[in-house]
């Protein structure tokens, strides 16, 4: 095959799907909970743009708002009249504490800006993030990704480009971190749920202890909610789980598929932004197109009763998936929330990175992902993959999905793959 102009045919390798039965997969259109490929075949989607399309693909309210913004001029280049209302709407997520907001375009940029704010506010340089955490693709914060050399357990705490690591659900390791490096520790940067580590959710007791040590040390907490933001309601997922952040980053679901991100923070944390010590730049940040998408998304979610069907649907799907494997004599469980979760072939959910690494099964996950695709269902096909549920998933999608998982369980049972 001739080389593609765009390497691998996609500008983010995380969005690439491997060939299946000799065919590349490309999307021609997306609507609701479905993808239509270039051959006209419909798939139930659980990738949901890495979680960006919480409302579903091409939600009518978002499409209408963005169409108006395009017609009015999506890039005036100066302050526009809906950027402040969009920030106010988004700040509802932060509740009574995180009442200030500023926009970015990608989650990676939002995390980068939050780290700059934390360094400016504290006068310190070091950022500590979890082993296995994903906080964007800029080099300093790619440190410690799953299966990276620095994620392996050693006697020395790794440090690179003002970034260091700690281990989730290991309180002794957090205490050691503050004892060793606390004097230069600007911020703890942590996802409420480590999505790229198979939806590993830290214990409440761990988050409460982490908050206590950070506050005692004058270290800010940055909750990276780029992936999980809005997935448990219009509130901070981190606070829901026992973490008390000073700053929080958002992206994906806040724009319903339109590229937008944001940093929320306390008035105290934002003082260095207000006084100009930390600059915020970006030609595209907060433009009318993305502000319109945020406003439309938040308006849909004003009726928080929309979340109950989402949670119920996700809980039912998780139960049906484990039942499908159990019917073939295969132990399976899920980790995460009812609107985003990962699948594991084990009776016991992993609590730490080391446990997760020991339980991951690339061969089994590939077989399951391939079988699901052959049966009209698509998720993220990596060994650490996730399944995202949207408000658009309904009865028809549930029926297709359950049949596909039953077939996948049957294929796995007779495959001879060691579980």
Image: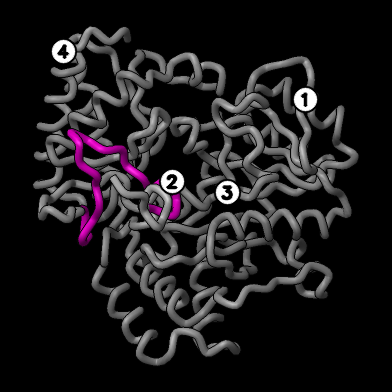
Residue name at image x 15 percent, y 50 percent: 394
Q: Position of residue 254 (x, y in %)?
A: 44, 63
| Residue 281, quarter of the rendered image | bottom right
Picture disc at residue 136:
3
* 159 with respect to 265 (left or right): right
390 or 162: nearer the viewer: 162
Earlier in the chain: of badge 2 and badge 3, it is 2
- Which residue position holds label 4? 328
Crowd tier of the residue under label 2, counting other residues whose Cα lies within 10 Å: few below 14, some 14–19, many 20 or above: few
Q: Which quadrant, please, contains the N terminus?
A: top left
Spatial separation of the CA atoms under disc 2 and disc 3: 13 Å
Residue 157's tag is 1
How many angstroms separate mark 3 from mark 1 (CA)? 21 Å
Q: Do the numbered discs 3 and 4 sit on residues whose CB atoms are within 8 Å?
A: no
From the viewer's perspective, is 169 left or right of 38? right
Distance in Å between CA atoms under marks 4 and 2? 34 Å
């Amino acid at each position: 095959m001739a080389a593609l102009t765009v390497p691998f045919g996609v500008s983010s390798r995380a969005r690439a799907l491997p060939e299946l039965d000799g065919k590349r997969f490309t999307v021609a259109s997306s609507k609701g909970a479905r993808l239509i490929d270039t051959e006209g075949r419909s798939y139930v989607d659980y990738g949901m743009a890495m979680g960006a399309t919480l409302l579903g693909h091409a939600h009518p309210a978002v499409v209408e708002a963005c169409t108006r913004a395009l017609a009015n001029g999506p890039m005036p280049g100066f302050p526009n009249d809906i950027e402040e209302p969009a920030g106010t709407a988004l700040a509802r997520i932060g509740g009574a504490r995180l009442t200030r907001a500023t926009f970015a375009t990608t989650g990676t940029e939002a995390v980068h800006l939050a780290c700059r704010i934390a360094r400016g506010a504290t006068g310190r340089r070091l950022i500590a993030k979890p082993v296995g955490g994903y906080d964007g693709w800029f080099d300093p914060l790619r440190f410690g990704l799953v299966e990276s050399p620095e994620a392996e357990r050693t006697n020395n705490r790794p440090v690179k480009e003002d970034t260091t690591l700690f281990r989730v659900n290991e309180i002794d390791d957090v205490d050691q971190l503050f004892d060793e490096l606390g004097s230069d520790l600007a911020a703890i940067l942590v996802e409420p749920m480590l999505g790229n580590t198979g939806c590993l959710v830290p214990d409440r007791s761990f988050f409460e202890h982490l908050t206590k040590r950070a506050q005692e040390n004058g270290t800010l907490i940055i909750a990276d909610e780029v992936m999980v933001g809005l997935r448990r309601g219009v509130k901070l997922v981190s606070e829901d789980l026992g973490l008390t952040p000073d700053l929080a980053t958002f992206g994906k679901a806040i724009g319903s598929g339109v590229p937008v991100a944001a940093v929320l923070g306390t008035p105290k944390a934002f003082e260095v932004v207000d006084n100009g010590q930390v600059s915020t730049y970006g030609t595209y940040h907060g433009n009318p197109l993305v502000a319109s998408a945020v406003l439309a998304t938040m308006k849909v979610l004003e009726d928080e009763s929309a979340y109950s069907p989402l949670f119920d649907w996700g809980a039912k799907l998780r139960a049906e998936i484990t039942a499908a494997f159990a019917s073939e004599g295969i132990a399976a469980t899920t980790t995460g929330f009812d609107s985003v979760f990962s699948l594991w072939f084990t009776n016991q959910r992993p609590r730490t990175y080391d446990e997760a690494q020991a339980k991951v099964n690339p061969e089994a996950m590939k077989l399951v992902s391939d079988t699901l695709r052959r049966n009209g269902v698509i998720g993220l096909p990596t060994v650490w993959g996730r399944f995202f549920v949207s408000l658009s998933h309904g009865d028809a999608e549930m029926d297709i999905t359950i049949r596909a998982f039953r077939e996948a369980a049957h294929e796995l049972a007779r495959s001879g793959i060691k579980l």
